[in-house]
Image: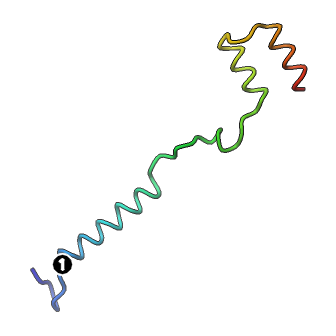
């Protein structure tokens, strides 16, 4: 149970494992938000996406694009 000079080796390993797990979680855990969400959404890009998905017509797209520009 005891290592050199009375040092409890098992407990030492447990603490190192806790530190590695904690640091790994901090640095390698996936973020809950993407870069685009943090940067802010561009209204013109959202308009293009909605047009590409077919949510708005060509006339609505052109009218909104003129309004945004």
Residue 39: image x %, image y %? 70, 43
Number of dots carrying numbers = 1
Q: Position of residue 13 (x, y in %)?
A: 23, 71
Image quarter of residue 15:
bottom left
| Image: 35 above or below 28 | above
List x then y, in percent, for residue 57. Answer: 76, 7
**Horizontal arrangement in the rendering, residue 16 relative to residue 24 (left or right):** left
Which quarter of the image is occupied by the N terminus? bottom left
What residue is drawn where x is 68% and y is 12%? 55
Q: Is residue 10 above or below residue 47?
A: below
Position of the C terminus, as image quadrant, is: top right
Residue at the image point whose x is 72% and y is 25% from the top: 46
Which class describes the residues within 10 Å of circle 1: few (<14), some (14-19), or many (20+)? Answer: few
* Residue 63 percent location from the top left of the image: 87, 14
Residue at point 52%, 44% (across, down): 32
Secondary structure beneath label 1: helix
The scheme the figure's colours follow is rainbow
Residue at the spot x=41%, y=56% of the render? Answer: 25
Which of the 4 image quarters holds residue 45? top right
| Residue for badge 1 | 9
Above or below residue 11? Residue 32 is above
């Amino acid at each position: 149970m005891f290592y050199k000079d009375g040092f409890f080796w098992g407990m030492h390993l447990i603490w190192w494992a806790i530190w590695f797990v904690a640091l790994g979680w901090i640095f390698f855990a996936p973020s809950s938000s993407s870069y685009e969400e943090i940067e802010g959404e561009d209204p013109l890009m959202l308009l293009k996406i909605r047009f590409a998905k077919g949510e708005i017509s060509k006339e609505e797209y052109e009218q909104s694009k003129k309004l945004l520009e």
